[in-house]
Image (tube, rainbow, N blue to C red):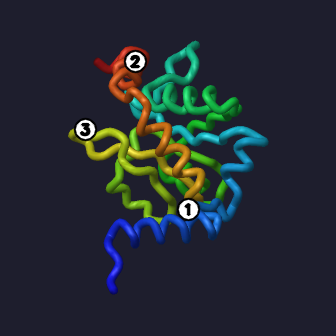
């Protein structure tokens, strides 16, 4: 007798749970709980910007701050170029890279969240360390419930991009 699709999905979910999936082979989720989130930031208004004499701002900066605040996590931001930050992410020197990244990025050696917002530029994502599935799922769960339109409006105002 063949099993139905719901039965196969239930079996797969049970198997994943019994195997401890999803996992973070490099323990990113545990590490950020102990030491905070190391965030690489590409300055790309309205997603992330920095104005003289003002703190780092932008839609994705605000989203990451809210994610961390809701979980009691500390944040450390490092500003840099996309290529350098993503190379460091691949080496697990960052836990997350933000700044207007889109899903069709040429960087295939890092991970990405599911697209959380679509614009004419593409499907926006956060970059995550490769293989850190539990950590990625935490971010995706947060993004799925976040009010992206409000964050984007605030980012446009903060970054001077209307």
Mark 2 vs mark 1: which is more N-terminal?
1
| Quarter assignment of residue 72 | top right
Is residue 84 in view?
no
Quarter holding the C terminus?
A: top left
- Between discs 3 and 2, the one toward the N terminus: 3
Closer to us: 51 or 15 = 15
Residue bearing mark 1: 130
Query: How far is disc 1 from disc 3 in space, using C-alphas?
Result: 25 Å
Q: Is residue 150 above or below residue 95?
A: above
Q: Is any atom of residue 29 visible in this view? A: yes
Dot 1 or dot 3: first in sequence order is 3
Spot occupied by residue 53 in the image (x, y as percentages of width and height): 58, 13
The answer to which quarter of the image holds residue 89 is bottom right
For disc 2, the neighbor class at 10 Å (few under 14, some 14 to 19, many from 20) is many
- In the picture of the structure, the residue carrying the numbered disc 2 is 154
Please provide percent x and percent y for residue 12: 47, 70
The furthest residue to the right: 34
The quadrant holding residue 157 is top left
């Amino acid at each position: 007798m063949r099993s139905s699709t719901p039965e196969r999905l239930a079996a797969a979910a049970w198997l994943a749970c019994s195997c401890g999936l999803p996992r973070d082979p490099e323990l990113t989720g545990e590490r950020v709980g102990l030491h905070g989130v190391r965030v690489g930031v590409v300055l790309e208004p309205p997603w992330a910007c920095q104005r003289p004499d003002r703190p780092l701002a932008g839609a994705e900066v605000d989203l990451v701050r809210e994610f961390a605040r809701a979980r009691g996590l500390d944040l450390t931001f490092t500003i840099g170029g996309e290529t350098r930050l993503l190379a460091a992410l691949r080496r697990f020197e960052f836990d997350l890279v933000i700044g207007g990244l889109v899903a069709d990025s040429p960087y295939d050696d890092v991970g990405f969240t599911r697209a959380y917002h679509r614009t004419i530029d593409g499907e926006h994502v956060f970059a995550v360390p490769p293989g850190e599935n539990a950590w990625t799922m935490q971010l995706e769960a947060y993004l799925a419930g976040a009010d992206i339109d409000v964050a984007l409006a605030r980012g446009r105002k903060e970054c001077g991009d209307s």
